[in-house]
Amino acid sequence: MDPRVKKLAKVLLNYSLKLKKGQLFKIQGEVVAMPLINAAYEEAVRLGAHAYTQIIIPHSREILLKHGSESQLEHLNPMLKLEISKIDALLVIMASENTRFLSGIDPKRQSLMQRARKPYFDRMIKRSAAGTLNWVGTQFPTQADAQEAEMSLSEYEDFVYRAGHLNAADPVAHWKKVQKEQMRLKKILDRVDRLHVRAGDTDLKFRVKGRKWVSCHGTMNFPDGEIFTSPIENSVEGKIRFSYPAVYMGREVQDVTLELRKGKIVHERAAKNQKYLTEMLNMDRGARYVGEFAIGTNYGIKRFSRNTLFDEEIGG
């Protein structure tokens, strides 16, 4: 096993999750992530936690999305409701054998399933905000994810572990240093009222007065490196064009331009997968409003990889 895998497991459980003896701990990921699943499980046992695993089978989701009735797509397993109310810690490992396995699915069916899971995610966020549930999402490097990033597997492994500063003698010390610097920046940003973003085909104005800025330093996403807030919902005005594509649920949407009035996206364009973009924006009443504005601060990430975990944190 790559020694960086065990090192990652230790950082995730001891720093990100602060896992304690006696806590109920869920580890979730695909079979291809088994090295990290096993390393995390071993570390959890060493810490005295009660760990269990959920192995995700992508083909099962594909079957349901292709052949399930609307009522089946809208069904939220009651065991998930119970689970999200009981667990103390959650590790979600992102790793794929095929990053595009849902590319042929009708977007309406995908959005139907996503809406059904909203109560699960809402409960998770509420417990996280209340401090009764710690969770973290991370990436385990695979051949498929390396291909998506246009790298060899060894290059992608170096990219992933470098972004988490796992080559450092003490990665936790690095992330504590990041936290200190970002808290300094947060104090400055907390005094800001208006923001104006201008670049090329982008001219966007919005207000953030009274909204808190949050420092992300490896406790909920790993790797991390950003400071974010939520704009005042009806304040966003103007146009933004994205030079990088968006990849979501196995679909790539390229060259996206959004026009906003009174906070709402009133017009969207994409060079590729325009229909899918529109379907996702029509998912629910909130989908056409901006939920987050962030500044990337991870200068260990220097290139686009088609993975939001890394791409939203590119330094600068």
Image: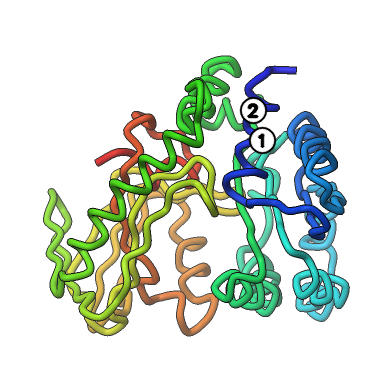
Find residue 10 and name its label: 1
Left or right of 249: which side holds 43? right
Q: Position of residue 225 (x, y in %)?
A: 39, 45
Q: Residue at x 44, y 50 (%)?
A: 246
Asked if 107 appears above or below 244 in the picture, the reply is below
Q: Residue at x 67, y 26 (%)?
A: 5
Viewer-closest of 208 and 166:
166
Q: Position of residue 194 (x, y in %)?
A: 13, 72
Q: Position of residue 26 (x, y in %)?
A: 79, 55
Q: Position of residue 101 (x, y in %)?
A: 70, 44
SS state under label 2: helix
What residue did someone put label 2 on? 7
Left or right of 155: which side holds 132? right
* Residue 205 visible somewhere in the drawing: yes
* Residue 150 visible somewhere in the drawing: no
SS state under label 1: helix
Viewer-closest of 192 and 56:
192
Left or right of 95: which side holds 80? right
> Which quadrant, please, contains the N terminus?
top right
Viewer-closest of 301 and 106:
301
Mark 2, other Cα within 10 Å: few <14 / some 14–19 / many ≥20: some
